[in-house]
Each structure stands twice: as structure tokens, then as C-alpha cells.
């Protein structure tokens, strides 16, 4: 679906046993890096992307020709300063920007589609761990990410407790709520209800379930914003018309905006990947992996945590982020927490929110000075 | 750094684990971290102050002492510090109990409503006292439960809380408070500093 000539790939030879029971090997992980690794190899930050993100964190994404998803936060002199730090980000397995996923072919040269194994957040981080060996990094300086990226951060430090000095989960949760699962299911149903989906066996860009995927994106996009933010930006403003047209065309700007968001999304994202990744998020329940005690997930790490939430985020609200803080405090872990004021909803972590970006920068830079 | 913090810092030995409840901009935390190698955490309700602590490289948790102390395990800190905020809580008794549960010891400071300037202000002017340690008007003060050094002294005793050290602070001078000079100190100190344990 995309031109993939600009994608760097690591082929993981080592077999990886997935949570579903299947084992994969010789599979590709697509990654990108920014800044340079110093001689002590102590300045690496592993960034994990969210549901629809990819390895192209900042600058122009060579495949979509759009700005990277975290351009506000990552780059020279930015919060995650690439003059100082070596930033690594890879496409999650199950994704569609070069890492092993449902649009890849099986041993018989047939596109996997829904024959691709169901993957979990745990599988994603275990796959990405191979990047440390690839770069010869013994210990990362930091791991960070928002939303599903934050889930990977939590899972990573739980799996590899001494592999990062600092840990920054942002706008995330340790367990997908019923509401989270419900919204994801809505998206999946939109995709599978599209007659072009064909049980996942669509084969070309022209015949893929564009409409279903667009609706999934539209529904999800609403959950990334806040009511106040939407009201302030769109209100009841009409779309290039003086009055209501008494039809079902996009009368309101918000309708037009959502339709646009849906249409640009289908050009860059694979419908089956959307199914797989949302499933991985729904299956995420870190406490359950430790018999219901979230603290146990972090009992072996000495890393310094900094957890960030946003006031208007109702998808992964402050309380769910605070639950992680509470679990860490109850075992005496080194944890800081800040709730950032913003009316931009869950999307805040991707936007230019000065208090957020300065907190992120200060935490990283001060922690690095103490190294 | 204000004199109160200097006195608090002198009560804490090196290399201890300390929680500063209501740590504000982190001045005391930074001093303890830099000068006494203290493993220091802060709890602060103001978003602005939280940002200032982060900018100083301090570990701070945004939160409210009345709700958020319960997440810390029993005796998980060597010292818990509460500077001049006990009187601002809805339920100071509950907060005090929590401080002593979380900390092996607690250091609590209280602005003294028995200070002679406070008494004179009320006596002579007939309006709510305003002093250096009590700078707000009655209608915008955060203080809900003002007390005197004497009040706090007897309150703590009635709860079977052990007082290790109690100090009266007046400008730059700190002096020991004991049962025999309590009335005098209650008149001439504008701040009481108590090191306690339960």
C-alpha cells in the first residue's frame, strides 16, 4: 500500500514465542533512529508509538510525506532533544509500516490477512527488545510513549526491569477498561461490516475496506478529543454553506472534519492491522499478569518513573494513570506524577502543550545530568 | 532558604528517606537532596509548583495530602515533613494520623495563633490578625483550623504521640519548648516546630 523504500528493517532471527502460543522467527522489525548514540551508549531513548503511529517519530515521514506523529516533542532542542539523545522507534508487530504484520506474506507467498497470529502488547515489546542487541545497548536511558505507547512502556519495564534508567508512561492505563474495549469493538465492527473486508482477504489497495476503516477512524478520533475542545473548534459552524441543506451531506464543519480524518487515514493504514492492534490493546491487563497485583509488575525495577496525564483525557483518564502511581508508591518505587492542564483531550500528548513539553524536557535533562 | 527550613533540615540525619507533604516549589527538598544526600519525595497540589519541582530535578507527585497519603505503605519514610499546612486541611487530625503512619517520624510546623502580635492585633484592632506567617485576610485564607503552640502541644499529648523535640521559632532564633516554658514560648514564638512519632 505504501512505497517502502525508506524503511530500515532488522530481521529478527531468534524465535519469539507469542502469547497466543505460536512462535515466529526471521521476522522484520521496521525502525527509525534520530540523533546519535554516544560512545558510552548511555543516551538511548526507546519511544513506543500509539495505535496508528509508526517508527517515523519526527521530521517528514518519507512514506506519507507528512510530519512525524511526535514532531512537537522530539527533535533538536525539543523536549526529547536529539542533539543530546539517541531516539529509537520501531513499528509494532501487527502494524503496517514494515514490521511483521497481517499484510505480510506467509511461507506460501499468500498474504496473511486474519491468518496472522493475534499479538499482544507483551509480544510487541518482546519483539522490540531485539533492537537493544542490534545497537549494542546494555541499558536505555529512557523509555517513553503515550496511549498504547505507554502500555508498551509499562510492559517493557516489567519484562526487562534493569534495561532502562527512567520510565515515562504518558496518558495511558495498565488495563483496558470496558469503555476502551467498547470503542475498539465499534471500530472493528465498522471494518468487518464493510463488504470489501472479505474476512480479511482483500488483496489490493483499490479493493480494501476503505469505508469501514474510515468509520473506525472517525469514531476513534472523537475519543481522542474533548467535548470542550470540539465545541471551541467547531461548535455548530457550517461547512462552506450559508444554511442547512436538509440532506445528509456534511452540513457541519465537524462532519466534514471527521470525514477528512477518515479519508486520509485509509491511505496510510491497513484495515487488518487496525483489527490486530486494537485487539492487542484490549487484551492488555498488566495486573492480571501478576495475579491482580499491579505492584508486582514493577517489584524488580529500580528505574525512576515519571507518569503524566491530561485533565481533559477521558479515554485514559487521570485516575487510571494515578492507579499506576499508587501501585509504584506502594512498593516504594521512585515515581513522580503530573497532571497537565489541557482541553485537547487524549490527543494532548501529541500536541504543542508547553507545560507538558517542559515537564518532559526537565525530567529527562535533569535525570540525565544525574547519570 | 527560610530559617524554618534550616531548623527542619537540622532535625534530619544524612542519607534518610523523606517525604515532604505540600513541598511547594521544592526549596527544602532541593536543600536536603543536595546537602544531606536525602532520598526525597514531594507531594504537592499546585500544578505550577509541581512544574517548578520537576524543573529542579525533584521527584514530586501531584496530589492532595488528604486523599493521596493513603497510597504510601506504613513507615515507608524515615521522616515525613509538613510545613505550615496542617491548619489548612478539612480534617487535620486525620492528616496527622496519616503522617505518623507513613513516616517513622514526622516533622510538623504550625503557625502560632498564640503569638503576642496575633493576640494584640485581635485585642487592639478587633479584626482578624495578619502577620508575617499569617498573611491572608479572613475571607481568602486557606487556614481552617488555626491553633496555638500550646493547643498543638496538648493535642499531640492527648493522642499519645511522642514528642522528640519541640522548637519555638521567632525570626532567626529557635529554642526548645518544654512543659515548663510552654506559656512563655506560646506568647513569643510565631512558629512551632515539632518532631513527633507514634
Image (cartoon, coloured by chain):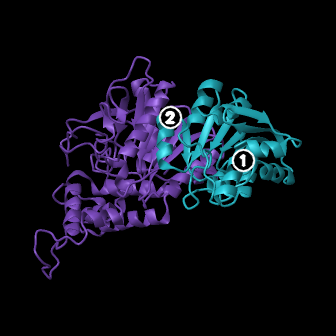
Chain colours: A purple, B cyan
Q: Residue at x 32, y 53 (%)?
A: A273
- How packed mark 2 is, by other alpha carbons closer than 10 Å (few <14, some 14-19, many 20 or more), is many
Parent chain of label 1:
B
Q: Is residue A264 above or below residue B194?
A: below
Q: What is the x, y in percent for residue A299?
A: 63, 40
Q: Quadrant of residue A34?
A: top left
Q: Quadrant of the N terminus of chain B?
A: top right
How many other residues sit within 10 Å of disc 1, few (<14), some (14-19) or many (≥20)? many
Please indicate whether residue B81 sits to the left or right of residue A121 in the image: right
Compare residues A328 and A175 and report the one nearer the observer.
A328
Same chain for the residues at labels 2 and 1, yes or no?
A: no
Mark 2: which secondary structure? strand
Residue B150 position, x and y percent, is 80, 50
Residue at screen point 62% across, 35% down: B40
Tell me if I can see residue A138 in this picture. no
Q: How many marks?
A: 2
| Callout 2: chain | A
Where does the image place residue B125, in percent across and percent down from the top left?
63, 57
Left or right: residue B13 versus residue A239 is right
Q: Nearer the viewer, residue B197 or A186?
A: B197
Residue B189 sits in which quadrant?
top right
Residue depth check, mark 2 versus mark 1: number of the one nearer the observer? 1
Residue found at x 11% / y 68%: A240
Q: Which residue is mark 1?
A: B115
Look at the picture and state if B170 lies above or below A197. Answer: above
The answer to whether one can see residue B184 in this image is yes
Which residue was labeled with disc 2?
Answer: A166
Question: SS for tag 1?
Answer: loop
Mark 2–mark 1 Cα distance, whole angstroms, equals 47 Å
Rendered view: A188 above or below A360: below
Q: Are marks 2 and 1 in contact (CB under 8 Å)?
A: no
Amino acid at each position: 500500500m505504501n512505497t517502502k523504500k525508506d524503511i530500515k528493517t532488522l530481521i529478527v532471527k531468534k524465535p519469539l514465542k507469542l502469547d497466543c502460543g505460536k512462535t515466529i522467527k526471521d521476522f522484520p522489525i521496521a525502525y527509525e533512529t534520530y540523533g546519535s548514540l554516544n560512545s558510552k551508549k548511555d543516551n538511548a531513548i526507546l519511544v513506543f508509538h500509539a495505535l496508528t503511529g509508526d517508527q517515523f517519530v519526527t521530521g517528514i515521514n518519507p512514506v506519507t510525506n507528512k510530519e512525524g506523529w511526535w514532531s512537537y516533542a522530539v527533535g533538536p532542542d525539543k523536549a526529547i532533544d536529539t542533539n543530546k539523545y539517541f531516539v529509537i522507534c520501531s513499528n509494532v508487530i501487527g502494524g503496517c509500516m514494515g514490521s511483521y504484520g497481517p499484510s505480510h506474506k506467509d511461507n506460501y507467498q499468500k498474504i496473511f490477512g486474519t491468518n496472522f497470529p493475534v499479538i499482544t502488547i507483551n509480544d510487541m515489546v518482546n519483539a522490540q527488545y531485539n533492537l537493544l542487541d542490534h545497537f549494542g545497548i546494555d541499558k536505555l536511558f529512557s523509555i517513553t510513549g503515550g496511549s498504547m505507547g505507554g502500555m508498551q512502556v509499562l510492559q517493557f519495564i516489567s519484562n526487562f526491569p534493569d534495561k532502562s534508567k527512567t520510565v515515562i508512561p504518558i496518558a495511558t492505563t495498565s488495563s483496558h477498561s470496558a469503555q476502551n474495549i467498547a470503542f475498539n469493538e465499534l471500530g472493528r465492527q465498522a471494518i468487518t461490516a464493510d463488504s470489501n473486508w472479505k474476512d480479511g482477504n482483500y488483496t489490493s489497495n483499490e479493493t480494501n475496506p476503505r469505508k469501514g476503516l474510515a468509520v473506525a477512524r472517525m469514531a476513534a478520533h472523537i475519543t481522542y478529543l474533548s467535548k470542550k475542545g470540539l465545541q471551541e473548534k467547531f461548535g455548530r459552524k457550517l461547512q462552506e454553506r450559508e444554511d442547512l441543506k436538509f440532506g445528509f451531506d456534511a452540513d457541519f464543519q465537524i462532519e466534514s472534519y471527521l470525514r477528512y480524518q477518515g479519508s486520509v487515514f485509509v491511505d496510510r493504514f491497513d484495515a487488518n492491522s487496525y483489527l490486530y492492534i486494537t485487539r492487542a490493546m484490549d487484551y492488555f491487563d498488566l495486573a492480571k499478569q501478576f495475579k491482580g497485583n499491579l505492584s508486582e509488575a514493577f517489584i524488580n525495577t529500580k528505574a525512576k518513573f515519571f507518569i503524566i496525564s491530561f485533565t481533559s483525557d477521558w479515554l485514559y483518564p487521570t485516575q487510571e494513570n494515578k492507579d499506576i502511581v499508587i501501585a509504584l508508591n506502594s512498593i516504594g518505587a521512585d515515581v513522580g506524577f503530573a497532571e497537565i492542564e489541557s482541553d485537547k483531550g487524549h490527543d494532548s500528548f501529541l500536541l504543542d502543550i508547553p507545560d507538558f513539553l517542559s515537564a518532559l524536557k526537565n525530567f529527562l535533562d535533569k535525570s540525565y545530568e544525574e547519570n | 532558604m527560610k530559617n524554618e527550613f534550616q531548623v527542619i533540615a537540622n532535625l534530619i540525619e544524612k542519607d534518610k528517606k523523606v517525604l515532604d507533604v505540600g513541598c511547594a516549589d521544592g526549596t527544602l527538598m532541593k536543600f536536603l537532596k543536595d546537602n544531606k544526600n536525602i532520598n526525597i519525595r514531594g507531594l504537592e497540589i499546585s500544578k505550577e509548583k509541581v512544574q517548578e519541582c520537576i524543573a529542579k530535578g525533584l521527584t514530586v507527585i501531584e496530589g492532595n495530602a488528604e486523599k493521596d497519603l493513603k497510597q504510601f505503605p506504613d513507615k515507608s519514610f524515615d521522616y515525613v515533613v509538613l510545613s505550615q499546612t496542617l491548619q489548612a486541611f478539612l480534617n487535620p487530625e486525620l492528616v496527622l494520623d496519616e503522617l505518623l503512619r507513613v513516616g517513622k517520624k514526622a516533622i510538623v510546623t504550625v503557625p502560632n495563633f498564640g503569638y503576642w502580635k496575633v493576640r494584640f492585633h485581635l485585642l487592639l484592632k478587633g479584626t482578624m490578625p495578619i502577620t508575617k506567617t499569617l498573611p491572608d485576610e479572613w475571607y481568602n485564607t486557606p487556614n481552617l483550623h488555626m491553633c496555638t503552640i500550646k493547643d498543638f502541644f496538648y493535642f499531640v499529648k492527648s493522642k499519645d504521640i511522642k514528642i522528640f523535640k519541640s522548637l519555638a521559632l521567632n525570626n532567626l532564633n529557635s529554642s526548645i519548648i518544654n512543659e515548663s516554658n510552654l506559656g512563655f514560648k506560646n506568647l513569643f514564638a510565631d512558629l512551632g516546630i515539632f518532631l513527633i512519632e507514634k
